[in-house]
Image: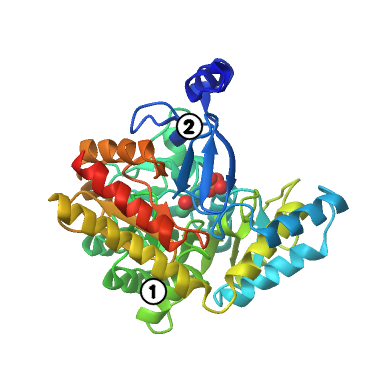
Amino acid sequence: MSTSRSNAALFERASGVIPGGVNSPVRAFRAVGGTPRFIDRAQGAYMWDAEGKRYIDYIGSWGPMILGHGHPAVLEAVQQAARDGFSFGAPTEREIDLAEAIIALVPSVEQIRLVSSGTEAGMSALRLARGATGRSKIIKFEGCYHGHADALLVKAGSGLATFGFPTSAGVPAEVVQHTLVLEYNNLAQLDEAFATHGPEMACVMIEPIAGNMNFVRASVPFMTRLRELCTQHGALLVFDEVMTGFRVALGGAQSVYAQLIPGFKPDMSVFGKVIGGGMPLAAFGGTREVMSQLAPLGPVYQAGTLSGNPVATACGLATLKEIARPGFFDALSASTRSLVEGLSGAARNAGVPLVGDSEGGMFGFFFADSLPQNYGVVMGTDKERFNRFFHGMLDRGVYLAPALYEAGFVSAAHSAEDIAATVQAAGEALRG
Ligand SMILES: *Cc1c(COP(=O)(O)O)cnc(C)c1O
């Protein structure tokens, strides 16, 4: 290892030319402290940093790498697509293939448009919901992240009478004045918001299983009421499944809720992460009626130079094909559950309070006595212990999400031995 290849040296160099040394803030390790690891390469369940240290990877690029890194079938599809051309700015057959594949897996989606990032998909879905309903007001929930579009970077005002305040400089107050921010899983607030603003409400955007406040499920009564209120008031229910789509189940979180609530469907869905298999690709879709409001058919404008990119669609299609194999999600769910059970067991043995939950290949754990139901409670869990645990695990070659409010991800490449090694490391880290 030469000094110029140390993580610390790379971080210093990066910080000279890139704000904070990173191209997306959470990568800077600000929440947990310490030096970010610069990753050289990854294979299967592992990543190697610039110093040659190996980590068992539980981020998987924040969800996309559901097959593990460098899956041979995906690699082959990407290489073939790259040989045929990187981008044309004209339609391709693979865009149809991918749209058809998604529609076949998600019954609520009749038409879909491909874009390049979850932020773009969320922003476009919001514009479409407003355009299709002719209304301006929207509801989002505290702790849910829908990308960094201006109208969605917002925190709750004081009480339901006032709409939100921007959470980022550079977002004018006027831009978020139509965004109402409610507490996740709070039925009374939901009822009150619709009673007050129902006729003006364009849509409600929600992470059905929230992965941007660790791992918090919308309760069944809450989701049931949300569906009823949206239908009753003519507001569109928009599921942000950028994280959960093709990750918690083949049909996304909506298929999980459809099993719990008969006939349940959202009106629109937003996808990203897994559908690109690690390449920049995202999408938003819904009923034919709503989607027909988009340009060039309708008055809602949206466009993209690299939308439906031929290499990205090849990567996404190859990924979807693998995860649609019979038994894929059963095996992934079992392996994710064994990880969460192992972590809980290790904590019990060490006398540390820890609770966890998972669905499909997505999981979360908290240093707390019971599972939090909203953002405020998540942020009240033991941060010092989480940060110590994160670094204890990192030192032992296990790469967890570097913030207590982020979910974790298991891939099909994680073996029983990888999970056992992780649980072993957790036992040591929790005692250390
Ligand atoms: C990651 C994420 C986004 C944003 O996607 P980007 O591709 O990072 O822009 C939006 N919504 C949810 C739920 C996400 O997890």
Q: Are the residues at dot 2 and dot 1 in contact (C-beta closer than 8 Å)?
A: no
In screen coordinates, is 110 left or right of 162? right
Residue furthest toward the left? 351
Image x and y of residue 98, in percent = 70, 66
Quadrant location of the C terminus?
top left
At label 1, the amino acid type is: Gln
Q: Secondary structure at mark 1?
A: helix
Q: Which residue is mark 2?
A: 37
Of marks 2 and 1, the one in the foreground: 2
Against 385, residue 349 (above or below) is: below
| Mark 1 burial class by Cα count in 10 Å: few <14, some 14-19, many 20+ | few
At label 2, the amino acid type is: Arg
Label 2 and label 1: CA atoms lie apart by 50 Å
Image x and y of residue 326, in percent = 56, 79
Image x and y of residue 224, in percent = 33, 74
Could you tell which of marks 2 and 1 lies nearer the N-terminus?
2
Q: Secondary structure at mark 2?
A: loop
Residue 13 can be seen in this image: yes
Q: Nearer the viewer, residue 95 or 78?
A: 78
Looking at the rendering, which quadrant does residue 104 occupy? bottom right
Residue 294 can be seen in this image: no
Residue furthest toward the bottom? 262
Identify the residue at horizontal 57%, vertical 62% (top origin): 132
In screen coordinates, is 18 left or right of 354? right
**Dot label at residue 252:** none
Identify the residue at horizontal 74%, vertical 47% (top origin): 306
| Mark 2 burial class by Cα count in 10 Å: few <14, some 14-19, many 20+ | many
Q: Which residue is mark 1?
A: 232
